[in-house]
Image (cartoon, helix red, strand yellow):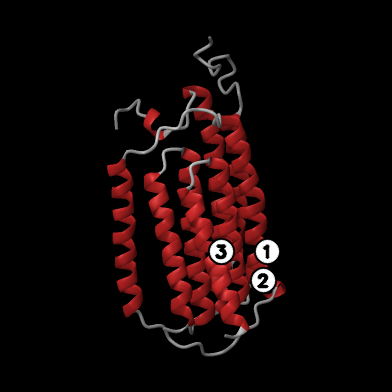
């Protein structure tokens, strides 16, 4: 067993185990930890594909920023000692059935798919990606910057306490 | 099966686990986690196909970067909406958000 296969297997196992934790466990904090684990696995898969820069960006954005934001949202919203009513059994079964059917369909497509063989090898460096982003794909780059700015301002506006200036948004059920 | 098929298989499983979680979870934050898993599966697909098959690799890198940016923006908006919903309804359970009787 060579080194590449070992790295791929370890990253894939990390990804799938993390994903199962992220959707299967009951505690929402454990879900977030599983999500971070799954994204570390995906970053490892990116490393085995030779795109180091993408792996680092993925770790920074998903595991760093988004994970922390999710923890904050949990602490601001969901009381951990609140009683958790489990999903009814037919709904869980239906969800599993849907996922299995979609997986089977995608697997049939994937098994019959034929990809052209790799022709030339291209070294993907951060410098090269940056040059592409600011020359050929500069419109997409600028649009994504505008989208991020709008999303940040919108997030602040939506989560602010007094959206309408008055005290309409106060908790209704005061004991 | 060559390498590319193994990568696509992992992405397929990740996507379907995310789909299962999105349908099955009650908590809005749990649904967001499942959605982000599906997005990560898609970007894994794009990067694997463009770096292991005959197409040019630049498109995959740029598309994956843009996907990560969109996911970050979407996560920020969604989490702030959850905080606002919690303030209005005192719950982020999807079963409680049925005022429109949908």
**Residue drawn where x is 51% and y is 60% of the image:** A17
Tags 3 and 1 in contact by the CB under 8 Å rule? no
Q: How crowded is mark 2: few (under 14 residues within 10 Å), some or many (20 or more)?
A: some
Question: Nearest the camera: A111 or A118?
Answer: A111
Look at mark 3 in the image and give the residue it sits on.
Answer: A14
Q: In this view, does A150 lie to the left or right of A100?
A: right
Can residue A97 be seen in this snapshot?
yes
* Distance (Cα) linking label 2 and label 3: 18 Å
**Residue drawn where x is 39% and y is 28% of the image:** B96
Q: Residue A52 carries which label?
A: 2
- In this rendering, which labeled residue sits more in front, label 3 or label 1? 3
* Distance (Cα) linking label 3 and label 1: 17 Å
Q: Which of marks 3 and 1 is nearer the N terminus?
A: 3
User: Does residue B30 sit above or below B70 in this rendering?
Assistant: above
Look at mark 1 in the image and give the residue it sits on.
Answer: A56
Q: Is residue B72 left or right of residue B32?
A: right
Q: Residues within 10 Å of mark 3 (few under 14, many from 20)?
A: many
In the rendered picture of this protein, how many numbered marks are placed on residues?
Answer: 3
State whether discs 1 and 2 lie on one chain.
Answer: yes
User: Does residue B54 sit above or below A51 in this rendering?
Assistant: below
Q: Residue B66 carries which label?
A: none
User: Does residue B11 sit above or below B75 in this rendering?
Assistant: below
Q: Residue furthest bottom?
A: A119
Tags 1 and 2 in contact by the CB under 8 Å rule? yes
């Amino acid at each position: 067993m060579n080194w590449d296969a070992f790295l791929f297997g370890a990253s894939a196992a990390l990804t799938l185990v993390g994903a199962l934790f992220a959707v299967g466990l009951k505690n929402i904090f454990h879900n977030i930890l599983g999500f971070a684990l799954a994204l570390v696995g995906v970053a490892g898969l990116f490393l085995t594909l030779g795109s180091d820069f993408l792996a680092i960006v993925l770790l920074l954005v998903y595991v760093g920023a988004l994970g922390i934001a999710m923890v904050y949202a949990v602490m601001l919203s969901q009381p951990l000692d609140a009683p958790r009513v489990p999903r009814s059994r037919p709904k869980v079964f239906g969800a599993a059935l849907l996922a299995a059917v979609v997986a089977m369909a995608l697997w049939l497509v994937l098994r019959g798919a034929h990809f052209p063989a790799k022709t030339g090898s291209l070294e993907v460096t951060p410098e090269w990606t940056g040059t592409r982003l600011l020359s050929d794909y500069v419109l997409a780059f600028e649009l994504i910057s505008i989208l991020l700015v709008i999303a940040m301002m919108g997030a602040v506006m939506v989560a602010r306490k007094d959206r309408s200036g008055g005290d309409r948004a106060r908790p209704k059920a005061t004991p | 099966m060559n390498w590319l098929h193994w990568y696509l298989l992992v992405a397929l499983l990740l996507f379907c686990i995310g789909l299962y979680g999105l349908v099955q979870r009650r908590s809005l934050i749990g649904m967001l986690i499942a959605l982000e898993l599906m997005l990560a599966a898609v970007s894994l697909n794009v990067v694997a196909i463009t770096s292991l098959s005959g197409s040019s690799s630049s498109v995959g890198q740029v598309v994956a970067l843009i996907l990560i940016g969109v996911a970050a923006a979407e996560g920020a908006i969604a989490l702030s909406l959850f905080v606002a919903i919690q303030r209005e309804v005192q719950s982020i359970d999807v079963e409680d958000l049925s005022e429109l009787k949908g």
